[in-house]
Amino acid sequence: MQAHAVLFRTFSPAVYTLAQRMLKQPALADEILQETFLEVLGKISGFSGKGQFAAWIRRIAVNKCLMHLRSAWSRHGVGLEAGETAPGSGELADPGRPEGFAEQVQARLDLSAALERLNDTSRTVVWLHDVEGFTHREIGELMGKTASFSKSQLARAHERLQGFLDGSSKEDEKTCMRVLKSC
Amino acid sequence: MHASTEELLSLRDGEAVAEAVVSHVDDCEQCQGTLGRLSMMKTALRSLPELAPADDAWQRVLARQKSVAMPIRRRFVPQLVGLAASVLAVAIVLQVLDDPGRRAVRGMPEQPASNNQLITTTAPPTATAQPAGMSASAAAGGIPLATLISESQQLERTLRALPRGPQVVSGGTAGTISELQDRIAMVDYQMSMGQLDENDPDVARRLWQERIELMNSLLAVRYAQAQQVSF
């Protein structure tokens, strides 16, 4: 069992991150994490050894996330903790960081927020392709669509992400102007 | 005309792009700027911090693993035993019909066809209808030892006839199969260690009866497994 614990410690952050990026909600990400490792532990003796172990675990997690996104509950329901994600927020207050660090963290927060504003399909495609390294063909297969579908979704996702980020920059500028005028 | 986002993304990712698009981007500052932003976006997405699961996440996985394994035995096995018992009954009836003289040759009393379903008596109350040949006294130990041994042999033959299990089995199923096999081995061990008291046939009957029950359960799980594979 100790080996399993080591396995969990090694791979759980990647699985949890993937799940939270795809599903947005920590509670759901936690559920996917548990289900993924239950399956991994149950099937580990049957792992063929073909391909990387990490890729095998990741694929299980992706399938579970997609299954969740496809479920009627997900389509019609609203999560319990929507909008709760705030990765890396605790690092802002660190005074020992180099100059510009706060801006970097803010940029990450903006990007995380923009990512969460994408619809499920666009968010999933952009995360699987740009971060997890899935090919368009693989994404198409996972989603029951074509590679072309994945390509067009990725393009749309990037256009929207850029739009959201530009929008947030403009919002920031407006806020700054309001603050300056009030002084 | 500028390159589309899709074309620029293909260019960014080193995928095949029309020659005309490539030469346009080479000469177009606006497209180059967009391409640069798309590359930066990918880098930024990849550099988003990894998120850490809750500290007790592993403990909860372990707890769920245990709770998943338990209900399989408690809830499903009795139903599966019933299912397997029915299948087994059909198999035995077919075998008896195929070889009606078998029992007589082996010196066992001829029984009506309905009594040949005695094998299902090992199923729990949730199983299919109680066979006509089974009485409470029989269940309590009235069954001849030879019948029990024959029944056990029949179960072994049926188990061997089942297709091999899948290479990938859920933890719960694997655990159930393993536990049943261990318990059967324990009964065999008790028998082989001479714990069968020649003067007390009830002990022998009890062990053989227990062995049959365990094998019925094993057959039920293996049968369910085989069904899943066939689907």
Image (cartoon, grey):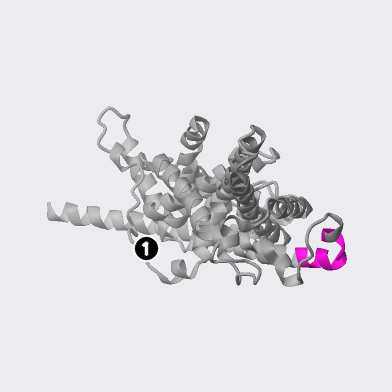
Instruction: Evaluate whether residue B52 shows in this view.
Output: no
Residue B129, position as x, y percentages in the image: 60, 72
Residue ranking furthest to the left? A183
Say which residue label 1 marks.
A79
Q: From the viewer's perspective, tell me whether residue B15 is left or right of residue A128.
A: right
- Total marks drawn? 1
- In the image, which residues are magenta? B92-103
Quarter-wise, where is residue A143 in the image?
A: bottom right
- Say whether residue A59 is magenta: no
Front position in the image: A18 or B178 = B178
* Residue at the image position 16 percent from the left and 55 percent from the top: A181
Q: From the viewer's perspective, tell me whether residue B101 is left or right of residue A113.
A: right
Instruction: Evaluate whether residue A39 shows in this view.
Output: yes
Front position in the image: A77 or A182 = A77
Residue B200, position as x, y percentages in the image: 60, 43
Disc 1 on helix, strand or loop? Answer: loop
Identified by mark 1, the residue type is: Gly
Q: From the viewer's perspective, tell me whether residue A109 is left or right of residue A143.
A: left
Residue ranking furthest to the top? A96
* Residue at the image position 50 percent from the left and 67 percent from the top: A71
Q: Chain of mark 1?
A: A
Front position in the image: B192 or B14 = B192
Residue ranking furthest to the front? B199
Front position in the image: B53 or A136 = B53
Quarter-wise, where is residue B151 in the image?
A: bottom right
Q: Main secondary structure of the magenta part?
A: helix
